[in-house]
Structure formats: structure tokens, C-alpha cells
Amino acid sequence: MESQFSSLTLDISEPLVCPFSGSVVSEKSSKSSSPVPSSSHSPTATESSHTPLNSSSSHTTYDQYRCPVFTQEVDPLLIKTSLEDRIAYLTDFLNFTSRDAEVISKIAPSVNDVIPSMVDGMYAKLFEFDITKKVFMTRNQGFDGPLPQTLEELTLDSAQIVFRKVFMKAWARRVLTADYSSGKTWAYMDKVGIMHTGASPFKHQRTMGIAPLNVPYRDIALTLGWLQTVLHSAILQLPESVCSMSEKIEAVAAINKVLWIQNDLFSRHYIGD
């Protein structure tokens, strides 16, 4: 094998390229142990602030990456216990900005009409598999109507499913109309996460002895993925007279960020990370 590679030589005449900077550097400069940052760089609002939505742009210029000059310090224990700090980290990492909130607000009236059919489709999908359908054989919080005795008796028209659809539609509308500069929005989404784990975040439910939902995280994540596809499709099908293509792209990205934040606000209560 050595004889097969003995004739190969390494061509070092080609300039080296930093994979993050997008610029060519000489071999000499690539060996420098202490690169000097550009003097024109100044920390952005995201770099210097823990406040979500501190930027007016939702775009990252992907063809102009630079090795980061500023590295934020994140306390892994603090973001487990402080929702405010966790949201600051999530929104900074995903670059969820005021522009994202604006574009969601703009497309909301046009996408709102798809919510009823989206919720109907979501429950139809959950009914395709016994492990996701069985969840609804247990009485949900706030529902005091009749329950079917067998899985076969449980239908999309069953009283508890109709009851659950009301809450699901409310969640979907809130995603489209929420004030993302308010901590109350993120607190609500965090409680949505808690209430699916078998623990109740609401005092009145604990007082009344109402059992919360207990849904495996696996199925939560899959459902969010299904919802993401439906919302993306609805946005991309909006007519140009309502939303330009550039705005559709922004809206898809913005909804994607919100759903991944909601996903984290589910998973944190399952895996404790």
C-alpha cells in the first residue's frame, strides 16, 4: 500500500481558505496563533444583549461568515431554571428577531383560515397509529363528558376530540398572533410543554384533581413536524398580491423558528436539559 501512495505529493502552492471567513489567506498567515480581528467590527445588539428580538433583520448573510470575534457565555444551569434566560439563548441562537414577529403578524390573517382544516388533519394523522390514538382514551383536563370504552369506539367526532380541537386551534392562532416581545407569550408556550408531560402547570387543575395529558415526546416532536409542513405549505401558496415571494421566504423561516422554540419548550420538560 505504501508504494501506491509514495508518488503522491501535497500541493501547497494553492492559497488556503478559512472555512468561516470566506476569504483566502496565505500559508504564512494561516500558521499565526493569534489572528487579529478586523478593526471595523463592533459587537452587534445580539452580542451585547440578552433581550430577545433586539434586531430588525431576520436574515443571516450566509456567504459572508466570519470566525466569531465575540463569544457569548451561556450558563447551562441557569437556562435550565430561568425561562427568561433560556428564551434569550434560543432567540439569539435562532436569530429570531422583531422582523420575524412582524412578518408572522403580516401573514396571519391570510393563513388563519387554514387552521380548522389543519387541526382536523392533525387529529386524523394521530388516529392513523394506535400509539398516538390511545392517548385520547384517558380523560383530558377540563373534559367531563363521556369517554369511549374501546379504541375502536373513539372517533374524530368523539366529544373529547372535539373538546381537544378547541384548544389546538387556540394554540395555532396564538402562534400567528402572539406578541413575541412579551414574556407572557413564552410562558404560555412553556406551560403548553409542561402540560403534556403528565404534570400540571396550572394551579386550578391541581386543586381540582384534573389529570393532565401524558404524551411521549417522540409523538410531540413528530406532530410539530407535521404542523410545520402544513403551515409552510399554506404560506408558500399565498397569492403574490397578498405576499411577495421574499416575504413568503421570511415567513416560512419565522414560523420555523417559532416551532423549534416551542419544540424546545416541550423537550426541556422531558429530558431535563
Image (spheres, grey):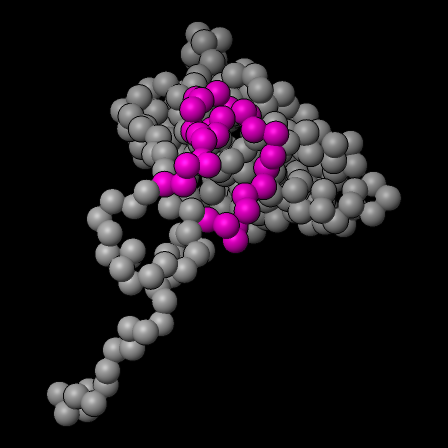
Residue 75 spot, x, y in % from top left: 29, 25
At horizontal 28% and vertical 57% (from top left) the residue drawn is 30
Q: Residue furthest left?
A: 2
Question: Could you say which is closer to the camera, residue 228 or residue 16?
Answer: 16
In the depicted structure, whether residue 164 falls above or below residue 35: above
The reply, left or right, for residue 178 in relation to residue 50 is right
Q: Position of residue 92 (x, y in %)?
A: 46, 31
Q: Position of residue 74 (x, y in %)?
A: 32, 28
Quadrant where the image shows the N terminus: bottom left
Q: Which residues are magenta?
A: 37-65
Residue 218, magenta (yes or no): no
Task: Name the residue nearer the viewer: 21 or 134.
Answer: 21
Quarter of image, res 9: bottom left
Q: Tell me, yes or no, if residue 134 can be seen here.
A: no
Q: Residue at x 62, y 20 (%)?
A: 179
Residue at horizontal 34 percent and vertical 24 percent from the top: 79
Tag count: 0
Q: Measured from the top left, where is residue 246 in percent x and y?
A: 71, 46
Q: What is the chief secondary structure element of the magenta stretch?
A: loop
Q: What quarter of the picture does the C terminus occupy? A: top left
